[in-house]
Image (cartoon, rainbow, N blue to C red):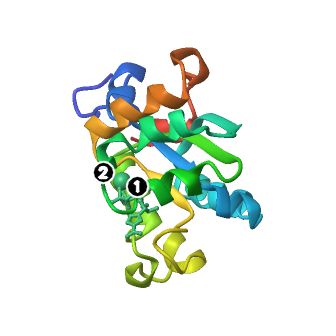
Amino acid sequence: MSATQTQPIIKAREQRFNALQRTLVLIKPDAVQRGLVGQIISRFEARGLSLVGVKLMQLDAQLAGKLYEPHFGRPFYDGLVSYMTSGPIVAMCLEGVDTITVARKMMGATKPAEAEPGTIRGDFAQRVDFNIVHGSDSPESAARELPIFFSQEEMVNHDPSYTYFL
Ligand code: RTP
Ligand code: MG
């Protein structure tokens, strides 16, 4: 390498992977029933978030209660658990840069009336109690929620081409 040559743009694999963050995203029962699974996954893929875990599941009250344990005792808690157990959901582990923030922004505000057009809730939902997606709201939440849905082995380690540009 000559003295004038700059650093290679492509960083070592370890450096690239340090920049990555994982989050839990759920496609809730109403979205599965409405046939929106493909469209919702497509949005995350198009944004460049990588699907490293995915499964179709029927939650029971115990599993839904574990996910929404921080909301236990709230007036909407019982309705939320019965909504989340009313039919199959799709659980995903997404990976990318600042994934938690990016996924939440793509979902839009909790109350669909406040969600901007262009967001998932802003485009597909009307009611807060049927707001079609869930996303972990912080690194602590992602660390608590991901193991509820995925074992370590169910989240793949791979080297997607986009990470060369991180
Ligand atoms: P999520 O946890 O599902 O990603 O949603 P979020 O962070 O945007 O909202 P959060 O405050 O954590 O509320 C969890 C879910 O509870 C339902 N909810 N219903 N009826 C109501 O007033 C009400 N408030 C919240 C929604 O399904 C919300 O996503
Ligand atoms: Mg939440």
So how many labels did they put on this image?
A: 2
The image shows residue 84, relative to residue 23, as above or below, that is: below
**Residue at 44% of width from left, 42% of height from top?**
165
Q: Is residue 42 visible?
A: no
Numbered label attached to residue 77: 1
Q: Would you say the residues marked 1 and 2 are in contact, meaning their CB atoms lie under 8 Å apart?
A: yes
Residue 152 on image: x %, y %:
51, 17
Q: Looking at the image, which is closer to me, 56 or 23?
A: 56
Residue 40 on image: x %, y %:
63, 60
Does 32 sit left or right of 27 as displayed?
right
Identify the residue under disc 2.
73
**Residue at 51% of width from left, 47% of height from top?**
25
The picture quadrant where one finds residue 139 is: top left
**Residue at 54% of width from left, 19% of height from top?**
151
**Residue at 54% of width from left, 26% of height from top?**
150
The image shows residue 43, relative to residue 119, as above or below, that is: above
Q: Which amino acid does label 1 sit on?
A: Tyr
The picture quadrant where one finds residue 67 is: top left
Rate crowding at label 2 as few (under 14), some (14 to 19) or many (20 or more) other CA atoms within 10 Å. Answer: few
